[in-house]
Each structure stands twice: as C-alpha cells, then as structure tokens.
Amino acid sequence: MLSILPTNNAVDPFRAGFVTSRAFVSAVVRNRVRRRLRETVRKHQREITDGAWIVTIARAAAARASYAQLEAEWLRLAKRASILATPC
C-alpha cells in the first residue's frame, strides 16, 4: 500500500517512510522487506516528483516476494499515485 501526502512547497525533496507490522514472522524478515523497499526508492529517486511525503505499508505477502516482485509492485503503485516524473 502506498500513501502520498503532498506538501505546500514543491521544491522540497520527497520524503519516504516504510511501515512493516509485527504480523511478519520476525524482525529479520521485517528489516529485510524495509531494506528492499528502501533500495527500490533509492534506485528510482530521480524519477520521483519533489514535494511529497511517501509512506509505503508492507503487507505480510511482501515477506515472501522477491526483490524484483517488490520493485515491480512499488513502481506500479507509484505510477498509479502519479508521483513518477518520468515513465519507468
């Protein structure tokens, strides 16, 4: 799930936050999912429009997904939320 909070100042760089609940099996799995999501945002940071706060909430199925699957899903959600400045 991806939530966006636009800010009044469009020149500020975007901010990203990641939430993983304790429904995941262990802290190791939660941290792995957060690291993968953080890397996805870092990899595509030049494509993300400025002036927004982005919150990504990982569901339990994310623990079983590969990095490529997580990246594809995040990009799909980002495109749907219209936060990508350039097409992927």
Image: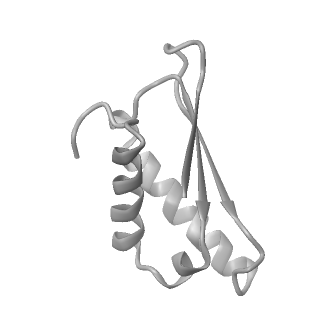
Q: Residue at x 31, y 31 (%)?
A: 85
In screen coordinates, is 66 left or right of 63? left
The answer to whether 26 is drawn above or below residue 21 in the figure is below
- In this view, the residue in front, 57 or 31, is 57
In screen coordinates, is 85 left or right of 55? left
Q: Residue furthest front?
A: 80
Q: Residue at x 60, y 72 (%)?
A: 59
Rendered image coloring scheme = one colour
- In this view, the residue in front, 37 or 6, is 6
Q: Residue at x 69, y 81 (%)?
A: 24
The answer to whether 55 is drawn above or below residue 40 in the figure is above
Please identify the quadrant where the N terminus is shown: bottom right
Residue 22, how many percent across, how many down? Answer: 78, 75
Q: Residue furthest left?
A: 87
The answer to whether 32 is drawn above or below residue 13 in the figure is below
Count the numbered circles shown: 0
Residue 87, how many percent across, how many down? Answer: 21, 40
- In this view, the residue in front, 15 or 77, is 77
Q: Residue at x 52, y 24 (%)?
A: 13
